[in-house]
Image (cartoon, rainbow, N blue to C red):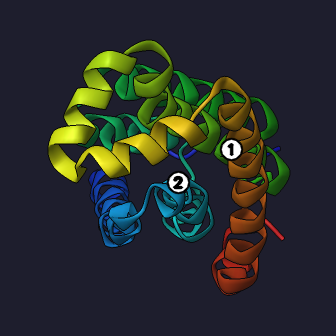
Amino acid sequence: MEEKKKFQMKDLIITALMVLCSQVLYRVLSFLFISPYTMLLAVPIWSIIGAIAYFLVPVKTKNPWMILLFCVLTSIIGFYPPYIISCIFAGIIAMLIARTKGVGNYKGLTIGYMIFCVLAGFGGMYVPFLFYADQTLKSYEKMFGSEYLGTLTKIVSPMTTGMMLILIAICGLIGAVISKKLLKKHFEKAGMI
């Protein structure tokens, strides 16, 4: 049976630093907003490269509550209510999976990460277009212009959203596999592999 680790202040610091790293990576990817076509790829690409920060949290803290904290802090930085709700909900699911399967269970962490990526993508990128279309479109027209908006409205639909959420889940899985290879030494120390 897995040893339960008590809360330590360093767990908060590690989690906060990983959230910061994750957000810096996402902000770097914001160059993809230059085109409506590449804008849709921001979240799938982030799902791949952001996995390292996500997986370092349970590896270093061994505390499932820090997974929830990672998701909550990530959502608050977004300042967008549907994104916040989606990330918190995903964080609760990921934390419960980690508590049930064990914080050292790589498969459980991977499933939790994939759920987090899909719900974060849905709440942050697709809810605005599906449920707040008028407000979002006006905002995008001000930021990017009418030509950008015209292309964007052609490519964003419920069908596109479904396909993109599947792509995000696949990219989350790819990110988990890459993270496992890159963090092999850390996973071995933590007894995860």
Q: Quadrant of residue 4?
A: top right
Q: Residue furthest top?
A: 131
Which is more toward the observer, 20 or 84?
84
Please name the amino acid that badge 1 sits on. Answer: Met
Picture coordinates of residue 53, whole percent (x, y): 48, 65
Residue 155's disc is none
Which is more toward the observer, 186 or 138?
138
Q: Quadrant of residue 31?
A: bottom left
Of pointers 1 and 2, the one earlier in the residue sequence:
2
Q: Quadrant of the N terminus?
A: top right
Instruction: Write the residue at 45% across / 55% down.
Output: 36
Residue 30 visible within the image: yes
Q: Which residue is mark 2?
A: 43
Q: Is residue 71 left or right of residue 2?
A: left
Front disc: 1 or 2: 1
Residue 164's disc is 1
Would you say the residues marked 1 and 2 are in contact, meaning their CB atoms lie under 8 Å apart?
yes
Give the alpha-carbon distance from disc 1 to disc 2, as whole Å.
Answer: 9 Å
Picture coordinates of residue 64, whole percent (x, y): 56, 40
Q: Quadrant of residue 166?
A: top right
Please name the amino acid that badge 2 sits on. Answer: Val
